[in-house]
Image: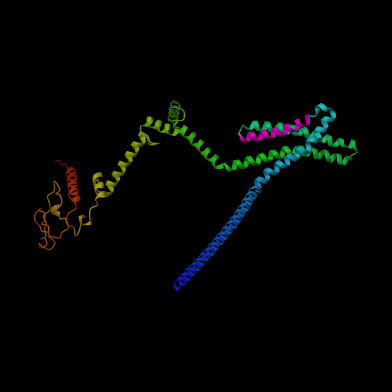
C-alpha cells in the first residue's frame, strides 16, 4: 500500500513539474511574441519616418526645381501674358459690339492674331527657320497688337461719355493700350531669352561644327581632286554604307598609292633622301661607315666593355686585320714575359688563351670581318 502512495506522489510531482514547465514555456513564448511585435512596431514607425522624410525631401526638391530663376521667369511671363490678354480683350469686344452685334468676333480675332503670330515666332525659333520668316511673324504680331491697342485707347477715352472724368478716362485708355502692347512684347522678350540661353548651352557644339566646316573647306581647297573622287565613291555606294572619311582615304590611296593620309610619292622620296643624308652625317661624325646590319646587331646584342680596344684590351695587334699595301710594323720592343698577361710577340699568331681569360663575344668576329672587308675595299682590293 505504501508503495502505491509513493508511486502516486511521484506521479503528481511529475505532473506538477510538467505543468510548471508548460507554463514557463508559454510565458517565454508570449514574451518572444511581444518582443517581435515591439520590433515590428518599431520597424513600421521607422519606415513611416523614412517615408515622411523622403516625401519631404521630394517636395523640397520639386519646390527648389520649380522656384529656379528660369522657371519663375518662364511661368511668370506666361501669367503676365494671360493677364494682359484678359485685360485688353473685353474692351475690344465691347467696342465692336457697340458698333454692331455681328462684329462681336472681330475683337477676339484681332487679339488672337497677335498671340498666334507671337507663338509662330517661337515655333520658327524651335525649327530654326530662316530669319526673314521670324521677322515677318514679329511684324504681323506687332501690327495686330498695335491695332488692338489703338482700339483700346479710344475705348478708354470714350468712358467720359459714361460719367468718368477725363483724367481717369485718359489713364484707362493709356493702361488698356499698354497692356495690349506689353503682352506680345513680353512674350517676344521671353522667346529671345530662351533662344539665347539655348544657344549659349550649345556654344561648344556650334564651335565644333564651325571648326569642322572650316576643315572641310580647307580640305577641298588643298585636295580638290581627292575630295571630288571621294564624293563620287560615296554616291556610287548604297546610301549610308560608305562614310565620307573612308571614301576619302580610299581616294587618297587611288591618287597617291599610299594609305597614309597626307603622304605622296614625292614626300616618300624626300623622306628617304632625308634618311640617307642622316646616315651620311652619322658616318662623317664617327669617321667610318656604319652599316645598318652592324647598328642592328649592336642594338640587339651590345658587346661587353672588354671588346673595346685600348689599354688593357684583350685583343692585340696580331689579331687585327692587316692593312693591304702597307707593311706591318715590326715591334721594336721586346714583349713582356710570357705569363704576365698571356701575350707574346709571335709574328701574327694568336696568343694562347689562359684559363680564366674572358671569352670573345660572338659579335667580335663579325665586327672584325666587316672591318677587314671595308678596309680592303677602301684600298682598291676585292676578294
Residue 265: where, in percent of width, then height?
35, 34
Which of the 4 quarters of the picture holds residue 201? top right
Dominant secondary structure (helix, strand or loop) of the stretch shown in magenta: helix
Tally of numbered discs: 0
Relative to 52, say whether 186 is above or below: above
Q: Is residue 110 magenta?
A: yes
- The region drawn magenta spans 105-126
Along the viewing direction, whichever of 227 and 119 lies nearer the viewer = 119
Snapshot quadrant of residue 161? top right
Q: Residue furthest right?
A: 163
Residue sitting at x 62%, y 43%: 197
Residue in view at x 25 percent, y 44 percent: 292
The quarter of the image holding the N terminus is bottom left
User: Is residue 351 within the magenta segment?
Assistant: no
Q: Nearer the viewer, residue 45 or 219?
A: 45
Tell me residue 182's x, y (percent): 74, 39
* Residue drawn at point x = 70 percent, y = 42 percent: 77
> Does residue 291 appear left or right of residue 356 in this picture?
right
Amino acid at each position: 500500500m505504501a508503495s502505491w502512495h509513493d508511486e502516486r506522489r511521484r506521479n503528481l510531482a511529475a505532473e506538477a513539474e510538467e505543468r510548471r514547465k508548460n507554463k514557463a514555456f508559454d510565458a517565454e513564448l508570449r514574451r518572444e511574441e511581444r518582443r517581435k511585435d515591439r520590433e515590428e512596431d518599431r520597424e513600421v514607425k521607422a519606415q513611416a519616418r523614412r517615408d515622411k522624410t523622403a516625401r519631404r525631401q521630394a517636395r523640397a526638391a520639386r519646390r527648389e526645381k520649380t522656384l529656379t530663376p528660369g522657371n519663375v521667369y518662364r511661368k511668370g511671363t506666361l501669367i503676365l501674358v494671360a493677364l494682359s490678354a484678359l485685360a485688353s480683350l473685353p474692351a475690344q469686344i465691347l467696342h465692336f459690339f457697340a458698333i454692331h452685334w455681328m462684329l462681336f468676333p472681330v475683337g477676339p480675332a484681332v487679339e488672337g492674331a497677335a498671340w498666334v503670330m507671337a507663338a509662330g515666332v517661337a515655333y520658327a525659333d524651335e525649327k530654326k527657320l530662316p530669319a526673314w520668316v521670324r521677322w515677318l511673324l514679329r511684324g504681323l504680331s506687332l501690327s495686330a497688337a498695335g491695332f488692338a491697342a489703338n482700339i483700346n485707347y479710344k475705348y478708354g477715352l470714350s468712358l467720359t461719355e459714361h460719367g468718368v472724368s477725363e483724367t481717369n478716362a485718359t489713364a484707362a485708355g493709356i493702361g488698356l493700350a499698354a497692356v495690349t502692347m506689353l503682352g506680345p512684347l513680353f512674350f517676344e522678350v521671353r522667346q529671345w531669352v530662351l533662344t539665347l540661353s539655348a544657344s549659349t548651352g550649345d556654344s561648344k557644339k556650334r564651335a565644333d561644327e564651325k571648326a569642322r566646316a572650316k576643315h572641310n573647306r580647307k580640305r577641298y581647297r588643298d585636295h580638290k581632286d581627292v575630295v571630288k573622287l571621294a564624293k563620287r565613291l560615296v554616291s556610287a555606294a548604297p546610301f549610308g554604307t560608305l562614310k565620307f572619311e573612308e571614301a576619302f582615304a580610299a581616294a587618297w590611296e587611288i591618287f597617291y598609292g599610299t594609305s597614309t593620309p597626307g603622304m605622296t610619292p614625292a614626300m616618300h622620296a624626300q623622306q628617304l633622301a632625308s634618311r640617307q643624308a642622316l646616315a651620311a652625317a652619322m658616318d662623317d661624325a664617327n669617321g667610318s661607315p656604319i652599316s645598318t646590319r652592324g647598328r642592328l646587331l649592336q642594338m640587339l646584342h651590345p658587346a661587353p666593355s672588354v671588346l673595346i680596344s685600348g689599354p688593357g684590351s684583350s685583343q692585340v695587334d696580331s689579331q687585327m686585320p692587316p692593312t693591304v699595301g702597307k707593311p706591318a710594323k715590326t715591334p721594336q720592343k721586346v714583349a713582356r714575359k710570357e705569363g704576365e698577361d698571356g701575350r707574346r710577340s709571335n709574328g701574327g699568331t694568336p696568343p694562347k688563351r689562359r684559363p680564366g681569360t674572358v671569352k670573345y663575344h660572338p659579335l667580335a668576329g663579325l665586327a672584325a670581318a666587316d672591318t677587314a672587308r671595308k678596309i680592303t675595299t677602301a684600298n682598291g682590293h676585292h676578294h
